[in-house]
Image (tube, helix red, strand yellow):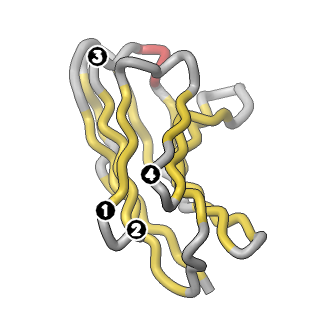
Amino acid sequence: QVQLVESGGGLVQPGGSLRLSCAASGSIFRINVMGWYRQAPEKERELVATVNNFHGRNYADSVKGRFTISRDNAGNTVYLQMNSLRPGDTAVYYCHLKTGGMDYWGKGTLVTVSS
């Protein structure tokens, strides 16, 4: 069984920064991809960024240059540094892990960008 525990969401003013963390535990294969998705009210869940076990990264166009995804050396914790936040970034952010052909999701953490 795999568990993902997210932290770091909250309220921030436009132009501000937040850092999300997600710790994975359980049966995780060496080859895997961790990432962040988000879902705004009345919108579909969308990819934000992913990082694989070789530290290869992928970003949505809307966050390129503002967000940075990384993972620790052990590979079981993924971070999302979010800078220059905009009201349009307001959403529930979900941690995702793909390993062993299975997809796992965290419960989500709310990020609200508002003045």
Report which residue position mark 2 lands on: 75
Residue 76's quadrant in the figure? bottom left
Report which residue position mark 4 lands on: 55
Tell me how far mark 2 sits from mark 3, CA to CA: 27 Å
Report which residue position mark 3 lands on: 84
Contact (Cβ within 8 Å) of mark 1 with mark 2: yes
Tell me how far mark 3 sits from mark 4, CA to CA: 23 Å
Please name the residue shown 33% across and 47% down the image. 20
Tell me how far mark 1 sits from mark 3, CA to CA: 23 Å
Residue 37's quadrant in the figure? top right
| Type of the residue with mark 1 | Asp
Res 49 label:
none
Q: Earlier in the sequence, mark 1 or mark 3?
A: 1
User: Height in image: 17 above or below 88?
Assistant: below
* Quadrant location of the C terminus in the rendered image: top left
| Type of the residue with mark 4 | His
Please name the residue shown 39% across and 42% down the image. 69
Please name the residue shown 77% across and 70% down the image. 101
Q: Earlier in the sequence, mark 3 or mark 4?
A: 4
Contact (Cβ within 8 Å) of mark 2 with mark 3: no
| Type of the residue with mark 2 | Gly
Nearest to viewer (mark 3 / mark 4):
4
Q: Residues within 10 Å of mark 3 (few under 14, many from 20)?
A: some
